[in-house]
Structures are given as structure tokens and as C-alpha cells.
Image (tube, helix red, strand yellow):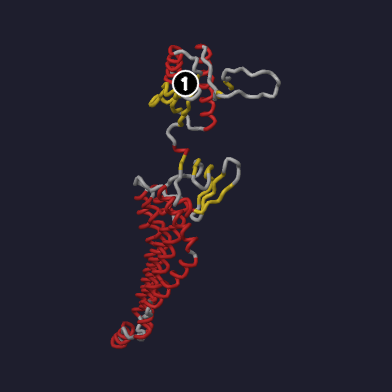
């Protein structure tokens, strides 16, 4: 009886018994399946609770991007070890090993694919103030690169020579670049604009091509609403190579003009006008105090010219016009108080010889000035 039990137990524990090996392989897979659940319910939850204590959500976003790939990796490892325990033919084991390595590559690529297009990528883009269009373009480009690298590495794992494929892709990319050079120039122009940030949506810009308010920016073109309410689409390659004046980013708005008064104005009255206009500007709340110039500049052809130069605090066009109008009225009031008249362009012409007016009246022998 004892000998029979010993023989039966030896048969059960015999490692060459296929059923015993299948049972062990199943237990190995079930263990990793349990480990996957334990990771999801306990380990991953503990790590997430720890990330809540940090000052940023970036670490939590990175963990969420790799949650699914890590769980799949645990299952892949369990499946591979379970099959590896079975007495499979060597050729089949080589196939399973290549399949496992390919699965690991796919899982890693999956994690990085989630990372460059998920919440973590959005948070990094916001921190570096990356434009939405450029961030979206970079995300798609990185995802394409990740997929391409994964495909190339998997092909190498299966023994394929990818050098010819890479060379073919390089020639194909060159052909596409030559065929779409204008479109690519616009895309790179858009990237340059986003990186340099000469303007943003809502800015009033002036270029040799267009003047107006920027309504939309994309990687290919920018749309500008002109002051005639027309919408102009300008290729980014053009904007990237032009001088762009951004009026919205002015710190203050300039006023510069000449005020011409008549030559009959006395020196004292002219000095009074200059002093009072300067005092007006220096005490006006809407005039920027950094630079104010009011000078009797030169003797003009028909006027005594006062040069007036200052800046306003406001940059808004309508408010600027209101401030300038108010100052103009006050300048007129000063001229009226001083009894000074604004000169208008005039020219005196003297005729050396007599003119026949055709009226039948005799002409004066003296030279006659004509205004």
C-alpha cells in the first residue's frame, strides 16, 4: 500500500508530466493576473495618493498616462513566463520570445503615445506658454515619430533589414518636401511666428502686406481683419519674412505736430503761447510725463512754427482721439486768450511788368503784389 502511494506521488510530482506543467503555467499566469489587480487597487492607488501631496499635477498626469501600459505589461510578463515553463519546441519558443519583445515595445510606445498627447503634455505646454496650434502640431509629430520607431524596432526584432526601408522613407520624404515646399515653408513660418511671438490674436499689426487686427493664427496662415472689415488671409511664410509693427504693444501713443502762427505775432505773445501749452501738457492727467516738448522751432515760409511733441497714457485708438481733441481745444483757447491767429499757407507774387487786365482801366505803373 505504501509503495503504491509512493509510486502515485512520484508520478504526480514528475516534472515531465504535461498536466502538471500546464497546471503550474496556469498558476503562474493567475499569479500575475492577481498582481495586476493588486497593482491597480493598492499600489497604484497609494502612488496616486502620494502625488496629491505635491504642488503640481504633472506627476499624477504622467502616472495616468502609463497606468494602462503597466497593467498590460504585467499580463504580458505573466503570459510569457507561463508559456516559457511549458515544454514547447525550440522554434515555437523563439517565436514566443520575439512576440513577447514586440509586445513590450508596443506597450512602451503606447505609454509614450499617451504621454505626448495627454494631460501631462498639456500642462507642460501651458507652463512654457506654447501656442495651442504649435503644441497640437508637435504632439502629432511626436506621436508619428513614436509609432515609426516602434515599427522599426519591431521589424528588427523579427529579423527584417530596415535600412532599405529607412532609405526609401528618406527619399520619399525628400520628394514630398520638394513637391510641397510652399506648404512646408508656411508651416515653418508659423512655427517661427509662434516661437518669436511678434503678435498674438487680438493685436493690431501693420506689415507691408496688411494692417488690421489678428483674428486667427494657424500653422499655415494667419487671418487679419482690416479696418475696412475685410478678412485677409496671409501665408505665414510671408509674415515670417516681413517687418511687423505691433501697435497693440505700444507702451504709450505719440502725438507730434507743428502749430504755425502768423508773422504778426509778437515775441512776447509767442513766448506766452509756448509756456502755456507746455504747462497744459505737463499738468494734463492723460499726457505721459516722460517726454514733453513745446518749442518755437523755426521760421516757416508763411508762419512761425511751434513744435509740439508728447505721448498719451492710453493706447486705445478711440480714447487717444478723445484726449487729442481735448488738448487741441485747450490749445485753441490759449491762442484766443493771447490774441494769436493760426497761419495758413500763403504766397506773395510780385510782377515786374505791367499787366493788361482786359478791363479797359489804366494800370498802375508801380509793381503790384498779388496774393
Residue at point 45%, 72% (across, down): 172
Residue at point 65%, 24% (across, down): 356
Residue at point 48%, 26% (across, down): 258
Q: Quadrant of the C terminus?
A: top right
Coordinates of residue 139 in the picture (x, y in percent): 44, 58
- The image quarter in which residue 110 lies: bottom left
Coordinates of residue 217 in the picture (x, y in percent): 50, 50
In the figure, 62 relative to 246: above or below? below
Front in this rendered view, residue 24 or 221: 221
Coordinates of residue 104 in the picture (x, y in percent): 37, 70
In the figure, 303 relative to 42: above or below? above
Front in this rendered view, residue 185 or 66: 185
> Is residue 27 shown to the viewer in this render?
no
Q: In the rendered image, which residue does mark 1 sit on? A: 304
> Is residue 149 shown to the viewer in this render?
yes
Front in this rendered view, residue 6 or 292: 292
In this rendering, position of residue 211 left or right of residue 76? right
In this rendering, position of residue 138 left or right of residue 202? left
In this rendering, position of residue 82 left or right of residue 200? left
Q: Badge 1: few (under 14), some or many (20 or more) residues near its Cα, within 10 Å?
A: many
- The image quarter in which residue 348 lies: top right
In the figure, 183 relative to 194: above or below? below
Mark 1, secondary structure of its residue: strand
- Count of residue discs: 1
Considering every residue shown, the one lying at the far right of the view is 360
Coordinates of residue 6 in the picture (x, y in percent): 29, 85
Q: Quadrant of the N terminus?
A: bottom left
In the figure, 224 relative to 111: above or below? above
Amino acid at each position: 500500500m505504501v509503495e503504491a502511494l509512493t509510486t502515485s506521488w512520484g508520478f504526480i510530482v514528475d516534472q515531465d508530466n504535461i498536466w502538471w506543467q500546464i497546471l503550474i503555467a496556469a498558476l503562474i499566469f493567475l499569479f500575475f493576473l492577481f498582481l495586476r489587480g493588486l497593482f491597480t487597487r493598492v499600489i497604484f492607488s497609494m502612488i496616486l495618493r502620494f502625488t496629491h501631496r505635491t504642488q503640481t499635477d504633472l506627476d499624477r498626469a504622467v502616472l495616468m498616462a502609463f497606468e494602462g501600459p503597466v497593467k498590460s505589461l504585467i499580463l504580458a510578463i505573466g503570459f510569457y513566463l507561463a508559456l516559457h515553463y511549458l515544454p514547447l519546441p525550440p522554434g515555437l519558443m523563439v517565436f514566443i520570445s520575439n512576440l513577447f519583445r514586440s509586445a513590450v515595445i508596443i506597450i512602451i510606445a503606447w505609454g509614450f503615445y499617451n504621454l505626448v498627447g495627454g494631460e501631462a503634455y498639456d500642462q507642460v505646454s501651458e507652463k512654457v506658454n506654447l501656442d495651442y496650434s504649435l503644441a497640437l502640431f508637435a504632439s502629432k509629430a511626436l506621436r508619428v515619430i513614436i509609432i515609426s520607431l516602434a515599427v522599426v524596432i519591431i521589424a528588427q526584432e523579427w529579423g527584417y533589414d530596415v535600412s532599405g526601408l529607412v532609405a526609401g522613407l528618406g527619399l520619399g520624404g525628400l520628394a514630398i518636401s520638394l513637391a510641397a515646399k510652399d506648404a512646408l515653408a508656411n508651416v515653418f513660418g508659423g512655427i517661427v511666428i509662434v516661437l518669436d511671438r511678434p503678435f498674438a490674436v487680438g493685436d493690431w499689426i501693420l506689415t507691408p502686406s496688411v494692417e488690421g487686427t489678428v483674428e486667427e493664427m494657424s500653422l499655415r496662415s494667419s487671418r487679419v481683419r482690416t479696418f475696412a472689415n475685410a478678412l485677409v488671409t496671409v501665408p505665414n511664410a510671408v509674415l515670417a519674412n516681413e517687418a511687423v509693427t505691433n501697435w497693440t504693444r505700444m507702451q504709450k501713443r505719440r502725438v507730434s505736430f507743428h502749430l504755425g502762427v502768423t508773422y504778426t505775432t509778437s515775441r512776447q505773445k509767442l513766448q506766452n503761447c509756448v509756456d502755456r501749452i507746455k504747462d497744459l501738457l505737463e499738468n494734463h492727467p492723460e499726457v505721459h510725463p516722460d517726454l514733453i516738448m513745446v518749442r518755437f522751432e523755426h521760421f516757416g515760409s508763411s508762419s512761425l512754427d511751434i513744435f509740439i511733441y508728447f505721448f498719451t497714457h492710453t493706447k486705445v485708438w478711440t480714447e487717444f482721439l478723445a484726449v487729442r481733441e481735448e488738448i487741441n481745444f485747450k490749445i485753441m483757447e490759449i491762442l484766443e486768450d493771447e490774441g494769436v491767429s493760426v497761419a495758413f499757407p500763403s504766397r506773395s507774387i510780385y510782377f515786374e511788368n505791367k499787366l493788361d487786365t482786359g478791363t479797359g482801366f489804366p494800370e498802375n505803373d508801380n509793381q503790384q503784389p498779388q496774393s
